[in-house]
Image: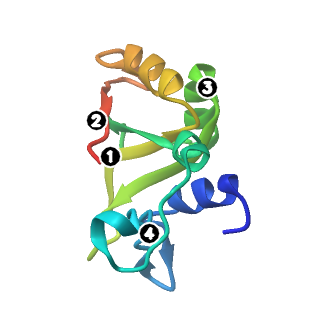
Amino acid sequence: MDTPLAAAKALGLKGVKVMGKPLRIRAAKDEKKKGRGTIALSKEVEKQRPVSVFVGNLPDQVDEKLFKKDFKTFGEIISLRFVKDKVSGEFKRCAFLGYKSKQSAEAALKMNGQVWMGKALNIELAKS
């Protein structure tokens, strides 16, 4: 990547489908730890890496614009991925939001248990 921000945005594309296949994107590990000649992420890139929030129990039909509008009140959203079944393509009623900062992601946790479009949301920090 040319810039730390470009690297952070690329990490936010993990799971996005291209030609029907989900992208697999990982940050390179420190070469001293793995000895494989990879490049360690700079601290600047780590700071800009999206902080992922899992949002579960979404309604069957989600308006993406409304979803983004309501959740950007907590901070800048870098990525959004609605989870779909790999075989059927059916929406699994959950999503992953990538926030620019940990503070924004933690603020979004306030929505846990709150009713949004008729459903009590299940929100937690995503597991890395």
Name the residue rendered at 35%, 70% in the picture: 89
User: What amino acid type is highlighted by mark number 1?
Assistant: Arg
Label drawn at residue 25? 4
Q: Nearer the viewer, mark 4 or mark 3?
A: 4
Q: Where does residue 103 sit, x and y in percent of width and height?
A: 50, 21
Q: Residues within 10 Å of mark 4 (few under 14, many from 20)?
A: few
Name the residue rendered at 51%, 46% in the picture: 46
Q: Nearer the viewer, mark 2 or mark 3?
A: 3
Pointer 2: what residue?
A: 57
Give the tally of numbered discs. Answer: 4
Q: Secondary structure at mark 1?
A: strand
Q: Quadrant of residue 56?
A: top left
Q: Secondary structure at mark 4?
A: loop
Q: Quadrant of residue 38?
A: bottom left
Q: Residues within 10 Å of mark 2 (few under 14, many from 20)?
A: some
The answer to whether residue 55 is above or below residue 19 is above
Query: Is 49 left, or right, of 128 in this rendering?
Result: right
Pointer 1: what residue?
A: 93
Q: Secondary structure at mark 3?
A: loop
User: What amino acid type is highlighted by mark number 2?
Assistant: Asn
Query: Going by the picture, which residue comes out furthest to the bottom?
Result: 19
Q: Earlier in the sequence, mark 1 or mark 2?
A: 2
Q: Earlier in the sequence, mark 3 or mark 1?
A: 3
Q: CA distance from mark 2 to mark 4?
A: 26 Å
Pointer 3: what residue?
A: 75
Q: Earlier in the sequence, mark 2 or mark 4?
A: 4
User: What amino acid type is highlighted by mark number 3?
Assistant: Gly
Q: Residues within 10 Å of mark 1 (few under 14, many from 20)?
A: some
User: What amino acid type is highlighted by mark number 4?
Assistant: Ile
* Residue contact between numbered discs 1 and 2, judged by CB atoms under 8 Å: yes
Q: Residues within 10 Å of mark 3 (few under 14, many from 20)?
A: some
In depth, the one of 10 and 36 nearer the eye is: 36
